[in-house]
Each structure stands twice: as structure tokens, then as C-alpha cells.
């Protein structure tokens, strides 16, 4: 009996702490969902102006979610798993048309433990549906890091040399493409089929892309990376969907596709045509 008397205060403390944690989590989830609803309302006029609509969380999944999971960079390592406080989820999406191209801009988030409490990590993904082409990726080279320090040529090796899922499944080749001298210092390209990649990324299209990327906000244009895989071209940007950058990024991707030989649009509900 004495033992129970000693344990009761400890049990009460534990119950109180668990109750506080549960209440805090409920409040955070409620606050995040309210923020998503307010953001959807704010994006609705822009989506309507572009002939599109905002899609709620029930249908907001990225078209390429099975190729690259949301917030994949924060969920792969052991430490990432330990710090994760919720599963990544798609919160909303904006569907629109730009010329003949079908576009989706989806936003995903997850809760993660930080040094000062639980944080909400957010990213958004731009996607354009195309006919299927051999997998390839073009990435803007970095000459300095966030602090302005010079970086070496190996800084791209991890991301670029990481094979897309469709290539890894088939044990395919993932090779660097040699670009023209006036663009090889600005872009790096890896591809499953170097011949097709060389035909797709012409010197003219690369120069146009460079000019467009330089006109984008620095954190978008400077880190621009486009993956072509299974009839989808996509790129991921940190943070929530930004009304100011949405259309410029969409026009950059669509403009590049317009300048790539044999690239054609596709309705996202249709299966990708054979390459």
C-alpha cells in the first residue's frame, strides 16, 4: 500500500506531462490546418486568373509522389526518422494551364523536432505533364554556398548522381552529359540516354534557361533543378507556395519545354506515351 502511495504522485506528473504534450500537438495541428485554409483562400484568385483552381488536401498529392516522396530529403536517414514528429502530407495544390501545358503546384509539410521545439517543414513542387522521355536531370551549378564561400566541383555529385527511381529499378545507366563550353560552367546534366539528352538540351535552350533562371528570385533560380521522369518534369522549392514566384517558375519550365525538340504536352490523367 505504501508503494502505491509513493507511485501516485509520479503517475499524476506523468499523466499531466502527457496531457500537455497532447494538447500542444492538437493546437499545433489545428493552427497548421487553419494556415493551410487561409493560404488556399489567398491563392484562389491567382489560380482562377490562370484558368485553374486550388485543390484541397484530399486531392493535393503530387503527380510524381511515387517517384519522389514529399520532403524526401528530411525522411531518409536514421536521425531524420528519430526527429520526425508526423508523416509528410500534401496540404494543397494549384492546378492550372499554361499554354498547352498542364501544371500542378503542390505543397507538402511535416512536423519535425528542432532545437527550440517542434518545427513545421514545408516545400512545394512544380510539375508539368509531358510525353515520356528518357530520364534526365538538369541542375544549376553552384559557385558559392549560402555564406558566399566558394564550392568545389563535387558539390553536385550526391544529388545529380542519385538515380531517379525509374532508372534505379531497371539498373540503368546514369551518366553526365558533356555540355557546350559556354554553358557547362552554369549547368550540369545527368541522363539515362545521353544521345536523347544532347538533342533535348540544345545550346539555344540552355542559354535561354540561364537567362530565365537569373531573372528568378535568387533562392529559386540559383538552385534550379529539373528532373524529367515518366512523363513528368518536376522541381522542388523550400517553403510554402509563393504567389510572387509561382507564375515565373511555371513560365520558366514551360518555356524550356517549348524550346526542346520533340517535347509535347500531355493530360495528367493520360498514361505517358512511349518515348
Image (cartoon, rainbow, N blue to C red):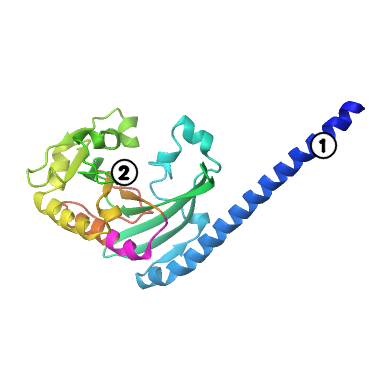
Front residue of this view, candidates 18 and 87: 18
Front residue of this view, candidates 154 and 126: 154
- Mark 2 or mark 1: whose residue is earlier in sequence: 1
- Is residue 27 found left or right of 3 in the rendered image? left
- Is residue 50 found left or right of 99 in the rendered image? right
Q: Are marks 2 and 1 in contact (CB under 8 Å)?
A: no
Kindly state the secondary structure of the residue where label 1 is placed: helix
Q: CA distance from mark 2 to mark 1?
A: 59 Å
Q: How dense is the environment of label 1, judged by Cα within 10 Å: few (below 14), some, or many (20 and up)?
A: few
Where does the image place residue 83, in percent across and percent down from the top left? 52, 37
User: Label 2 belongs to which residue?
Assistant: 230
Say which mark, if any, is on residue 200. Answer: none
In the picture, which quadrant includes the N terminus? top right
Asked if residue 100 is among those painted magenta in the image, a careful observer would answer no
Asked if residue 242 is among those painted magenta in the image, a careful observer would answer yes
- Is residue 195 found left or right of 35 in the rendered image? left
- Bounds of the magenta span? 240-249
User: Label 1 belongs to which residue?
Assistant: 9
Kindly state the secondary structure of the residue where label 2 is placed: loop
Where does the image place residue 28, in percent across and percent down from the top left? 59, 53
Name the chief secondary structure element in magenta.
helix
Up the image or down, 1 lies above or below 204; here it is above
Where does the image place residue 87, in percent across and percent down from the top left? 53, 43
Task: Name the residue rendered at 43%, 44% in the picture.
Answer: 71
Where does the image place residue 269, in percent across and percent down from the top left? 38, 54
In the picture, which quadrant includes the C terminus? top left
Extreme residue in the left direction? 181
Mark 2 or 1, closer to the camera? 1
Q: Quadrant of residue 184?
A: top left
Front residue of this view, candidates 104 and 224: 224
- Is residue 126 found left or right of 261 in the rendered image? right
Amino acid at each position: 500500500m505504501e508503494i502505491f502511495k509513493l507511485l501516485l504522485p509520479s503517475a499524476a506528473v506523468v499523466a499531466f506531462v502527457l496531457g500537455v504534450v497532447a494538447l500542444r500537438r492538437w493546437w499545433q495541428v489545428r493552427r497548421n490546418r487553419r494556415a493551410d485554409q487561409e493560404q488556399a483562400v489567398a491563392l484562389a484568385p491567382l489560380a482562377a486568373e490562370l484558368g485553374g483552381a486550388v485543390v484541397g488536401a484530399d486531392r493535393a498529392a503530387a503527380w510524381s509522389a511515387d517517384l519522389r516522396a514529399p520532403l524526401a530529403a528530411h525522411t531518409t536517414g536514421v536521425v531524420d526518422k528519430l526527429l520526425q514528429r508526423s508523416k509528410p502530407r500534401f496540404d494543397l495544390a494549384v492546378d492550372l494551364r499554361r499554354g498547352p501545358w498542364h501544371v500542378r503546384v503542390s505543397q507538402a509539410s511535416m512536423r519535425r523536432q528542432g532545437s527550440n521545439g517542434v518545427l513545421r517543414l514545408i516545400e512545394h513542387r512544380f510539375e508539368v505533364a509531358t510525353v515520356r522521355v528518357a530520364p534526365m536531370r538538369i541542375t544549376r551549378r553552384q559557385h558559392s554556398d549560402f555564406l558566399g564561400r566558394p564550392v568545389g566541383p563535387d558539390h553536385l555529385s550526391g544529388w545529380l548522381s542519385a538515380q531517379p527511381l525509374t532508372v534505379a529499378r531497371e539498373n540503368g545507366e546514369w551518366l553526365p552529359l558533356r555540355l557546350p563550353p559556354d554553358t557547362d560552367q552554369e549547368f550540369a546534366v545527368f541522363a539515362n540516354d545521353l544521345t536523347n539528352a544532347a538533342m533535348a538540351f540544345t545550346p539555344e535552350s540552355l542559354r535561354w534557361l540561364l537567362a530565365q533562371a537569373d531573372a528568378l528570385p535568387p533562392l529559386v533560380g540559383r538552385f534550379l533543378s529539373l528532373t524529367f521522369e515518366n512523363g513528368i518534369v518536376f522541381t522542388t522549392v523550400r517553403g510554402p507556395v509563393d504567389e510572387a514566384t509561382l507564375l515565373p517558375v511555371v513560365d520558366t519550365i514551360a518555356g524550356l519545354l517549348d524550346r526542346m525538340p520533340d517535347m509535347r504536352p500531355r493530360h495528367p490523367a493520360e498514361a505517358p506515351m512511349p518515348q
